[in-house]
Image (tube, grey):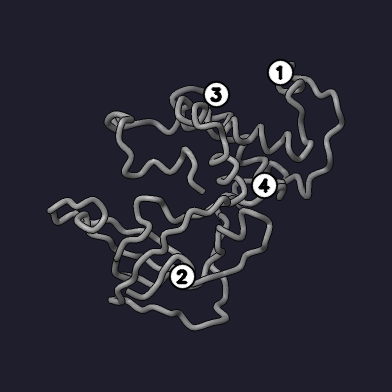
Amino acid sequence: MNGPHDMGGFTGFGPVAAEKNEPFFHEEWERRAFALNLAMGMTGSWNIDIARHARERLDPELYWRSSYYEMRHYALLDQLYALRLATPEEERTGHMQVPPLKVKRVPEAAAIPAILKRGGPADRPASTAPRFAVGDKVRTRNINPEGHTRLPRYARGHMGEIVMVHGCHVFPDSSAHGKGDDPHWLYAVKFTARELWGKDTADSVCLDLWEPYLDAA
């Protein structure tokens, strides 16, 4: 999806100012907002790819003027409204007015540490052999999908080299739209700065890209 989130290679947004020794949270509300995102994710109402796609679909102006945790919070509200788990009026007043629909599960507080430690592995058994191997030259496809994708705009239509084969993983382009895991081979692909931006330097970028994004060069 060509949304406001896909800013790699864009100009006009000013420098990225890294904060030295930046804390995880600057204010207590950020900690709570992040906890709400995790808690709702654990209910099984959506998966990580659906959540990412919700953030991509935010209005560009809202996305760009929001901090990291504000952006996640606004996307979470949109998901809650869409699934009838909350209403805008309830968010405004802080009081439930319409009984929400039931969720798949409500983890007990004591189980949360184990759930977080386990994470959400995305590797899956392979049903086909990989098309590419380490050292192969590949070219990314120049796609502009309406839905979710993990192939950034700045890397589309460019040549790179396979430097690692990660195995089969959930394909986000399908998972984000309720089409199941649809596993595909995942590769680390190295691109030179000259290939991506015409820069005559020794710099390079590595991207983890799924097989449907790639053609043999």
Amino acid carrying mark 2 in the image:
Glu
Q: Secondary structure at mark 3?
A: helix
Residue type beneath disc 3 = Trp
The reply, left or right, for residue 29 in relation to residue 80 is left
- From the image, tell me which residue sits under label 1: 92
Residue flagged by tag 4: what amino acid is it? Answer: Met
First of labels 2, 3 by sequence position: 3
Where residue 2 sits: x, y (%)? 48, 46
Which residue position is annotated with label 4? 42
Q: Nearer the viewer, mark 4 or mark 2?
A: 2
Q: Which residue is at 34% across, 67% downward?
A: 139
Number of marks present in the image shown: 4
Which numbered dot is residue 29? Answer: 3
Residue at the spot 86% in from the left edge and 28% down from the top edge: 98
Q: Where is residue 34 drawn, in percent x and y?
A: 56, 35
* First of labels 4, 2 by sequence position: 4
What residue is shown at x 46% (from left), y 58% (from top)? 143
Query: Which of the pair 100/24 is nearer the observer?
Result: 100
In the rendered image, which residue does mark 2 sit on? 211
**Residue 206 image position (x, y, % from top left):** 31, 59
| Residue at the image position 39 percent from the left and 78 percent from the top | 132
Compare marks 1 and 3 and give the one earlier in the sequence. 3
**Distance from the alpha carbon under mark 4 to that under mark 2:** 29 Å
Q: Position of residue 144 (x, y in %)?
A: 48, 53
Q: Earlier in the sequence, mark 4 or mark 3?
A: 3
User: Nearest the camera: 17 or 112?
Assistant: 17
How many neighbours does mark 1 have within 10 angstroms: few (below 14), some (14-19), or many (20 or more)?
A: few
| Element carrying mark 2 | helix
